[in-house]
Image (cartoon, rainbow, N blue to C red):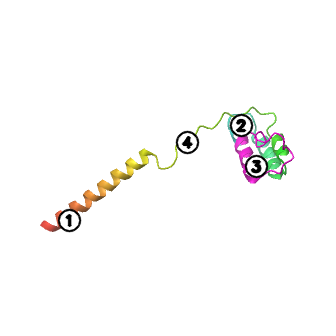
Amino acid sequence: MPPDEARPHAPAMRASDEDRRRVIDALQHHTQAGRLTLDEFADRCDAVLAAKTLAELRAATHDLPALPPVPATAPAGTSNDRHVLWVFAIALVAAVLLGLVYAAFH
């Protein structure tokens, strides 16, 4: 989504570094899809980095189709992560116990 779609009434609003990063990410996607040549990508990135307003950022992608929404990623600390940590903890305890038993009988 272009940075000013969420704020359509504010095309003259100043662009942030995050806004510029999102537009450059979109340009990279379009370049990988073959919609832009490397020279076009470089020219548009120069324009994005020099942009002061959201309208100037929008101009860098005005002739490109909208990107599909990015799927949500799983939050950190999912149950799979916890499962791996439990397996590691059990293996560590088992190794320590085996080491103690081995030391006791040798």
Judge whether 100 appears above or below 5 on screen: below
Looking at this view, name the residue that lies furthest to the top: 65
Q: Quadrant of the C terminus?
A: bottom left
Please identify, in this view, whether the residue under mark 2 or under mark 3 is nearer the observer. Answer: 3
Mark 3 or mark 1, earlier in chain:
3
Q: CA distance from mark 2 to mark 4?
A: 22 Å
Which residue is at a point 30% across and 54% down the rendered structure image?
90
The amino acid type of the residue labelled 2 equals His
> What secondary structure is found at the residue carrying circle 1?
helix
Residue 64 picture location, percent across and down: 77, 33
Task: Tell me the tag on residue 100.
Answer: 1
Q: In front: mark 2 or mark 1?
A: 1
Alpha-carbon span between mark 4 and mark 1: 43 Å
Q: Give me the residue at 74% from left, 44% from top.
A: 23
Q: Which residues are magenta?
A: 1-27
User: Which residue matches tag 2?
Assistant: 30
Residue sitting nearer the eye, 40 or 22: 22
CA separation, marks 3 and 4? 22 Å
Type of amino acid under label 4: Thr
Q: Amino acid at mark 3?
A: Arg
Callout 3: 10 Å neighbours few (<14), some, many (20+)?
Answer: many
Residue 73 marker: 4
CA gap, disc 3 and disc 1: 58 Å
